[in-house]
Amino acid sequence: MDVVKMNIIENILFNHSVEPVKYVSPGDIVTVNVDRVIMVDMAALHPEFLDNPPVKPFDPEKISLVFDHYVPAPNIEIANRVNRLRKVVDRWGIKDFYDVGRGGISHVLGGEKGWFRPGSLIANTDSHTIATGAFNTLGRGLGTPEVMNIIATGKTWFPVGETLKINLENRIKPHTSAKDVFFYMASKIGDIPNKNIEFSGNGIEYLNIDQRSSISTMCAEVSAEFAVFPEDKILKQYMNERGYMDYHAAVPDTNAEYIDEMSIDMGKIEPMVAMPDRIIGNIKPISEIGRVEIDVAVVGSCANGRLSDIRDVAEVLNGRKISDRTRFVVTPASKAIYEEASRLGYISTIMEANAMVTNPTCGACLGGHMGVVGNGDNVISSTTRNFKGRMGGSGAKIYLASARSVAISALKGHIAGDLNE
Amino acid sequence: MNNINGRVWIFGDDINTDLMYPQICYTLPQEEKPYHAMEANRPGWAGMVRKGDIIIGGRNFGTGSSRPAADNLKNLGIVCVIAESINGLFLRNAVNSGLPALEIHGISGIAREGDTIVIDFVNSIIKNARTEEMINFKPLPAFLMEIIENGGIINILKNKGMLGKPL
């Protein structure tokens, strides 16, 4: 028979297979060696981990512990639990430990620290681990019990899903963001459990790593298994600038197979919004939703709390004041982003507009702290999810949009995607 | 694995993890958590569930977070989740909690809420006890059934001596 042609995702799974195989293809289940395991502070809130932690990790050098969801601890219960979790650092001999004030959101920190090497495979206790796809890295969010198994053994399994190839063409418009590209894509493909996305196309070269990360992160919200970008000169430059030279990027074989292929002209996309309660089947252009007044605006999260997002917010606010009716919380996604945003003057611009800048955390996105919303609040957020009750009270209405559109909405006091409308 | 014979609850498309395990659950005592399942979308439902009940969902069941949502349904008394399609992370979490989760295209039409269905894992057939309508399903891989039959991945790790003393 002909040699099987594998796409990027299949190649990475193939390269990590524990058993020697000739190829992998859709329908297979492959047992893989994992290059890095990331555990976040939420493990402390799992009913099992603190009482029954793995005796020892398969390799302490390949394990990262990142406190990101509840930093700093918002209550006594969590403070006590993360105190217990901290003890695992010495017990296991973990070097890559990022406590309060030292790191940031794991999906952002992992890029900064060189944990996401092109061609590698990552497991993480958080569901937005698919974010690693921007780095040509396969990442899967997994439950704490499964991550305990990987910590003990260094291995796990993945089903090989069918892969959808999406060609991103042309440059996005100046007032449109990568988040809008995701929303547009999601409105076209709907939910795709068990399937992968591989990005291609001439428009990728116009997307920086922040923008690619925004898109790959949000692919969790269409239930994709994996979503990856190719390695190109922009990713090479990102890695090289940080001294991360030791990797082997994954490329698709010539004539690699895909279940389907579609093209998206990024130059035609307008600012979009996900209406409350769900993303799937619930996306509209902002220009079509009519007037929605806003009580709370939030910029942050693994999807859109990156330097490019903070820059967008600062550029929108630039000397203006937000609406009197709106509270605006801005959360840089990592310490490095916060420092750089501060150095560039973005933080003071945002604060002068009467927005509040918090420390890096996942906080508001999961309704944990640093921006919990109440019943009756109309919320516009650049975070990842608008599930009913996600950010606090189940009577809040959560609209999702780009950081830029959130900032414009905060200024105007109602949802808007055009500053000059 | 033995047959499961249970009463059906019907849920729609895109039922997400945060509905099954709302944020408030993270810091509640373990025994209180299950009673908050689905309180945002179906208030009062959790109190009506009996041990041995089955959920039939629509498309994209379990989309969302890595939180122990499947575990919460299991602790409420749910013994199997079936849906038109299931988010990959949720399916893994269900199996790793010892809760069977089956993706069956066409399952939505097989039962009304309150019907009893019989899930035959040996022959991979589901039968509605009222209508006698049947549907075949693709069984879960053997290694996943083994995890379920052991009551979840934690039990397996414990039995192998891979879990240590509390932190």
Image (spheres, rainbow, N blue to C red):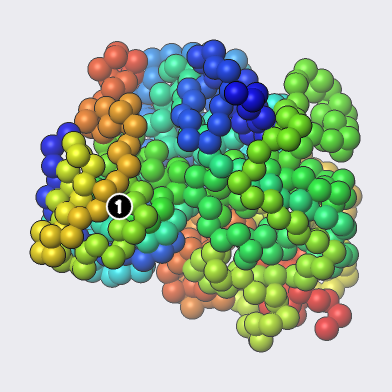
The residue drawn where x is 32% and y is 37% is B140
State the image coordinates of residue B58 (x, y, percent, origin top left).
37, 61
- Left or right: residue B41 versus residue B10 is right
The residue drawn where x is 86% and y is 80% is A420
The residue drawn where x is 70% and y is 70% is A272
State the image coordinates of residue A14 (x, y, percent, origin top left).
60, 23
B85 shown above or below A270: above
State the image coordinates of residue A43 (x, y, percent, origin top left).
44, 35
Q: Outermost residue toward the bottom?
A: A290
A376 or A156: nearer the viewer = A156
- Left or right: residue A109 versus residue B144 is right
- Left or right: residue B114 versus residue A380 is left
Q: Secondary structure at mark 1?
A: strand
Q: Outermost residue toward the front?
A: A1
Q: Where, quadrant-wise, is the C terminus of chain A in this rendering?
A: bottom right
Res. A193 in view: yes
A25 shown above or below B127: above
The residue drawn where x is 20% and y is 67% is B113
> Crowdedness of circle 1 by 10 Å Cα count: few (<14), some, many (20+)?
many
Res. A325 in view: no
Rendered image quadrant of residue A383: bottom right
Q: Where, quadrant-wise, is the N terminus of chain A in this rendering?
A: top right
Q: Amino acid at mark 1?
A: Ile
A102 shown above or below A227: above
State the image coordinates of residue A363 (x, y, percent, origin top left).
56, 52
| Number of numbered discs visible in the structure rendering | 1
| Residue at which label 1 appears | B82
Q: Chain of mark 1?
A: B
B124 or A314: nearer the viewer = B124
